[in-house]
Image (cartoon, rainbow, N blue to C red):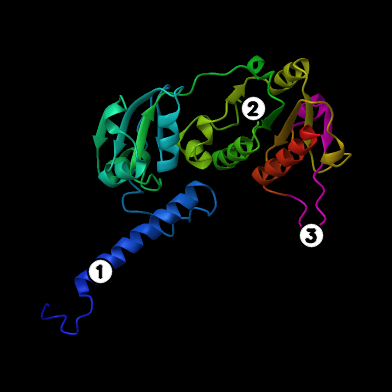
Amino acid sequence: MSKDNKTGGPSAEDRSAKDTHYATLRRAHRDNKRERGEIPTPAPQKRRRGSDDWKPPALAPDQVFLYGLHTVRAALENNERKKIKLSVTQNALARLEIDAETLGIPIEMVSPQDIDKVLGPEAIHQGVMLETRPLPVRRLEALKSSPLLLVLDQVTDPHNVGAIMRSAVAFNAGAVITTQRHSPTESGVLAKSASGALEMIPYIQVTNLADALGELHKLGFFTIGLDSEGPAPLEGTFSGDKVALVLGAEGKGLRQKTRETVSALARLDMPGAIKSLNVSNAAAIALYAARLHLRN
């Protein structure tokens, strides 16, 4: 019995080790809930050291850096994703729960500060960064067997698009289709917001959205544009056994050409005092309603 513990209870060292253990478990539990989108990632209260001086490195056109435990784990499990190098801290490597010997790519052991230099000090990377190539380009004609698609008309915020991808995967949509201009490209921010969903659903960027909608019509899709001034509620607008939901950017909504091209316009009826929703929330509700229609 130590001199500092004459009562026979746990020593200060024992209590400290136990507290550290439970703190680690609580932190891991919070991280997992954030990765699943169950709780939000807290906004930084102050800028981290070095953030004012950091400048993003120049990336090659085919170079993508993914980060975050759940995002990187999903990318490593995706056979269509070409992986180049994994940069990871010792702690993050243990939490990834992968077989490093069979991974088939170089693994670089780094410090969190090393990853900050590439991603910036504000990125919540959890000690892991994966250098990859972009996913293969998908074409619309490959989607003819899918009964449900989601189309975005210039939704620019990668956080919103990532959240929409999660909902699209949850409701088993065949693809998220968007425009090449005024839409986020494949990036670490988009992938982190999608929390693994980017690896699970085609993300198709088209040059001309009206032409793409016309092609979907030829493939048998009934396209419904969501509009707050739509002539009828969404649940009464569905038709046929193949549906493509079309959502516009917050504030601007659908562009006029898109409104003229879709098969029908519809609204989400909201009986409460608030009459508009974040586009990612609206997408989740619309996908649920579409699944109810397709089930019947």
- Residue lying at 73% horizontally and 32% vertically, measured from the top left: 246
Q: Is residue 258 above or below residue 158?
A: above
Q: For the magenta stretch, what is the residue range?
A: 255-276
Q: Quadrant of residue 115?
A: top left
In the rendered structure, which disc, 2 or 1, sits on the residue that comes first in sequence?
1
Q: Amino acid at mark 2?
A: Gly
**Label 1: few (<14), some or many (≥20) within 10 Å?**
few
Which residue is label 2 attached to?
174
Q: Which mark's residue is nearer the viewer, 1 or 3?
A: 1
Q: Which mark's residue is nearer the viewer, 3 or 2?
A: 2
Residue 87 horizontal side relative to residue 81, left or right: left
Q: Quadrant of the N terminus?
A: bottom left
Residue 231 horizontal side relative to residue 192, left or right: right
**Label 3: few (<14), some or many (≥20) within 10 Å?**
few
Which residue is label 3 attached to?
273
Q: Amino acid at mark 1?
A: Ser
Q: Are marks 3 and 2 in contact (CB under 8 Å)?
A: no
Q: Quadrant of the C terminus?
A: top right
Distance from Cα at disc 3 to Cα at disc 2? 34 Å
Is residue 243 highlighted in magenta?
Answer: no
In the displayed orientation, state which residue is furthest to the left.
3
Which residue is label 1 attached to?
16
